Image: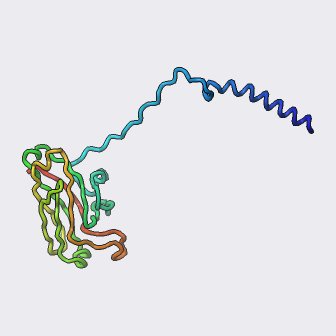
């Protein structure tokens, strides 16, 4: 048996002496010649910021910062009590100002639980307007945005409801506010 082990060791060493020099150029300590540098990683282009958003548009999600939930029934989104989005200033609004429009619905189930709701909008940290809604239904909230807030080309718009349905109520784990259908800025 000892002779068999010696023969195996000799053949193993012979194989290694043939194998190691063949690999040295790629994996050894010698530098590899004529290798081109790896290409720089590419950065995906961000989609352009729109001035008008339909809540059922999948591209709108890139501009909805906080407080908007996933699209439902392929047409609308629930909001939380506070929600924000970024909108582009339409051409010319940096000179004339703009009008913010927000289309939404207060469902019967929300109104019966909370009663009248007050919606407040702010742009760039400046409060634009508040309005109280005293019944369930479909509404469009409008507020003027001063030209100075649109001078940078886009603006963050923040909304706040004075009350909302807390998570875990009525079997839904989300905080529920209102149903959003559209959001946009038009030139004044």
User: Residue 174's image quarter?
Assistant: bottom left
Q: Residue at x 22, y 75 (%)?
A: 111
Quadrant showing the N terminus: top right
Image vertical order of residue 91 relative to residue 175, above or below: above
The percent position of residue 63, horizontal first and vertical second, equals 27, 52
Residue 101, picture quadrant = bottom left
In the displayed structure, would residue 31 be above or below residue 103?
A: above
**Measured from the top left, where is residue 64 in percent x and y?**
27, 55
Identify whether 43 is placed above or below 53.
Answer: above
Residue 172 lies in what quarter of the image? bottom left
**Considering depth in this image, is 158 or 60 the residue closer to the camera?**
158
Spot the residue most to the bottom. 112
| Residue at figure coordinates x 24%, y 55% from the top left | 85
14 sits left or right of 135 in the view: right
Q: Position of residue 6 (x, y in %)?
A: 87, 33
> Left or right: 129 with respect to 113?
left
Residue 83 coordinates in the image, percent (x, y) = 25, 61
Question: Looking at the image, which residue is at 7% across and 47% down?
Answer: 96
Q: Residue furthest top?
A: 34
State the residue at coordinates (74%, 29%): 16
The vertical placement of 51 against 132, above or below, is above
């Amino acid at each position: 048996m000892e002779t068999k082990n010696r023969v195996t060791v000799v053949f193993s060493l012979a194989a290694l002496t043939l194998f190691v020099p063949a690999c040295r150029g790629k994996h050894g300590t010698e530098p590899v010649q004529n290798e081109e540098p790896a290409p720089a990683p590419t950065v995906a282009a961000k989609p352009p910021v729109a001035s008008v958003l339909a809540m059922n548009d999948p591209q709108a999600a890139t501009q909805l910062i906080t407080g908007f939930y996933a699209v439902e029934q392929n047409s609308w989104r629930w909001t939380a009590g506070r929600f924000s989005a970024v909108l582009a200033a339409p051409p010319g609004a940096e000179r004339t100002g703009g009008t913010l429009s927000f289309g939404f619905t207060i469902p019967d189930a929300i109104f019966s639980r909370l009663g009248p709701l007050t919606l407040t909008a702010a742009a760039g940290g400046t409060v634009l307007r508040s309005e109280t809604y005293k019944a369930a239904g479909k509404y469009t909230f409008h507020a003027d945005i001063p030209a100075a807030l649109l001078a940078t080309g886009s603006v963050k718009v923040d909304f706040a409801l004075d009350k909302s349905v807390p998570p875990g109520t009525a079997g839904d784990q989300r905080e529920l506010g209102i149903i959003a259908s559209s959001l946009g800025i038009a030139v004044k």
